[in-house]
Image: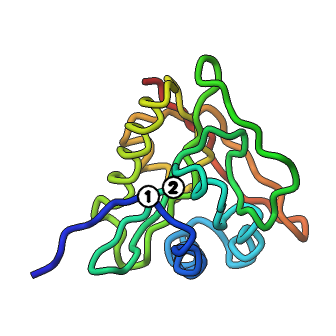
Amino acid sequence: MIASFILRPASVTDIPALEQLIPASVFALQASYYSTAQMEAALGPVFGVDAQLIQDGTYFVVEQDGQIVGCGGWSRRRAVFGGDRHSLVEDDTLDPSHDPARIRAFFVRPGWERRGIGKMILLACESALTAAGFRRAVMVATLAGEPLYAASGYSVEERYEVPLANGLTLPVVRMAKEF
């Protein structure tokens, strides 16, 4: 019998597993949308563990049989993407009375996609951010993630490219949802 998924807040002890899951997810699930060079350049500055989200209690993991099969979260801070190894400035907190919360850093283990893991995490984020007083959420979605977010009621606000090393860019989509 297969155990059901367990959603829980991430802890600092999860960081080593997340540091393995994130690149595996990127290289397997983003490969239809981005070149290998783009994905390599985006690891860290765009795709990476943000320990601040874990410390804030706003980052979740999904486990099955003790293995982390997905992760993602939301933030009450200004940053919209990126790992903490590339953070250059203090990440100020947002005011829920006029700022939108940020949906951040969703990754699913290869082979576990399309099983509702991303949706489960997204619903947990939306519940938590509305409980914290936020009435709007924004994200910078990858091209691979856009269909999930669109199906969950997020609308496209802008398409743009994030500058990366070596003159590369990463096409992304700014999306938003009102609550």
Q: Residues within 10 Å of mark 1 (few under 14, many from 20)?
A: some
Q: Nearer the viewer, residue 101 or 158?
A: 101
Residue drawn at (15%, 79%), measured in percent from left and top?
2
120 left or right of 89? left
Residue drawn at (53%, 75%), measured in percent from left and top?
13
Q: Residue 6: where, in percent of width, then height?
A: 28, 65
Q: Nearer the viewer, residue 84 or 143?
A: 84
SS type, badge 2? strand
Q: Residue 8: where, in percent of width, then height?
A: 37, 60
SS type, badge 1? strand
Q: Amino acid at mark 2?
A: Tyr
Q: Is residue 11 above or below residue 132?
A: below
Residue placed furthest toward the right: 166
Which quadrant of the figure has residue 88?
A: bottom right
Q: Is residue 15 above or below residue 96?
A: below
Q: Amino acid at mark 1?
A: Pro
Q: Residue 53: where, in percent of width, then height?
A: 60, 54
Q: In the rendered image, which quarter contains the C terminus? A: top left
Residue drawn at (66%, 36%), measured in percent from left and top?
158
Which quadrant of the figure has residue 87?
A: bottom right
Residue under pointer 2: 59
Q: Is residue 169 above or below residue 108?
A: above
Which quadrant of the figure has residue 118?
A: bottom left
Q: Earlier in the sequence, mark 1 or mark 2?
A: 1
Q: Residue 121: where, in percent of width, then height?
A: 39, 53
Q: Residues within 10 Å of mark 2 (few under 14, many from 20)?
A: many
Decide if residue 31 is in sight here.
no
Discs 1, 2 touching: Cβ within 8 Å = yes
159 left or right of 163? left
Residue drawn at (29%, 75%), measured in percent from left and top?
64
Residue under pointer 1: 9
